Amino acid sequence: MRDRRSPPRALLFDVQGTATDFYSTVRDEAQRIAGDRFPDVDTDGFVEAWRAGYTAALQPTTRAGWVSVRAVYRRVLDRIVEQYGLGQLTTADRDELTQAWEKLKAWPDVLPALTRLKRRFTVATLSNADVAAVVNLSKHAGLQWDAVFTAEMARAFKPDPAVYHMAATYLGAPLAEIMMVASHKYDLRAAARLGCQSAFVARPLELGVGGAVDIAYDEEFDINASDFIDLADQLGC
């Protein structure tokens, strides 16, 4: 942990992976929708490939080439179904499976910690997902944010600086008084380069049991936390 700066006024949270468990949610939906017809499918590998394809698809996107995240997930799904023996999924099946990304379960520590954090800080999302998707999954998971900001509002994806500047503008706060909270170090580093404070939250099960996830604490971040409750403790909530 670095020497602590003045406390932030607002906390911006990454959502998929940091606040919610996308891996088990999407895997369970895949098993529910396809399991009876395709019992031998490697659903763990399927979810990993789907997420990896989504992440790769965001990299070259620019403001001029904006596309919704919902469309990205669907496009990647259509590309990998044959690889995993799911090519016979119907259009309705694929639509329903894509909706799983908007029904993510919160990690167990998130709701009680957000209640504590909201008493002292403005808490908001800063997600690469679409606004509608974050609203839907927040309602589904019971996540009570003060505000919802997403990359869609900046027409650019994190780690593009425009996304962080957009959130700061809406919050009416300088970047130095905002803390980015994420389990993904690229996100924190991008925010920190602009002057934001940073809080790393380790999510060892983000990619399931045995998944290759970087959970090592790093002194470059203002806070390193084991979960949101630990984050609230360290922020004095």
Image (tube, rainbow, N blue to C red):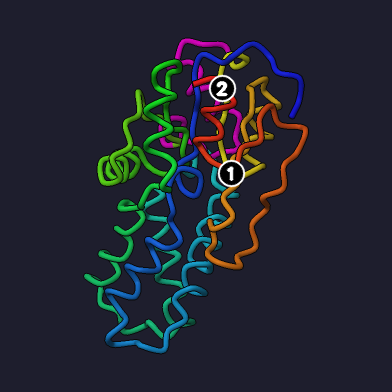
User: Is residue 116 left or right of 33 when viewed as pictured?
Assistant: right
Up-down: is 52 above or below 9?
below
**Helix, strand, or loop for circle 1?**
loop
**Residue under pointer 2:** 235
Along the line of sight, the residue nearer the viewer: 81 or 29: 29
Task: Kindly check if marks 2 and 1 are in contact, taking CB atoms under 8 A apart as contact.
Answer: no
Q: Residue at x 44, y 53 (%)?
A: 21
| Residue 165 among magenta residues | yes
Residues packed near mark 1 inside 10 Å, few (<14), some (14 to 19) or many (20 plus): many
Question: What percent of the width, then of the height, locates residue 133?
Answer: 32, 45
Instruction: Give the residues in magenta.
Output: 152-174
Which mark is on residue 114? none
Q: Position of residue 118 (x, y in %)?
A: 39, 22
Q: Quadrant of the N terminus?
A: top right
Choose mark 2 or mark 1, whichever is in front.
2
- Furthest residue toward left: 92
Disc 1: which residue? 183
**Of residues 56 and 3, which is closer to you in this image?**
3
Left or right of residue 174: residue 22 = left
Report x, y in % for residue 208: 52, 64
The first of marks 2 and 1 along the sequence is 1
- Residue 121 placement (x, y as % from top left): 45, 17
Is residue 154 highlighted in magenta? yes
Name the residue at 71% across, 27% down: 193
Residue type marked 1: Ser
Residue in the image at 41% along x and 59% along y: 73
Crowding at mark 2 (Cα within 10 Å: few <14, some 14-19, many 20+): some
Q: Amino acid at mark 2?
A: Leu
Q: Secondary structure at mark 2?
A: loop
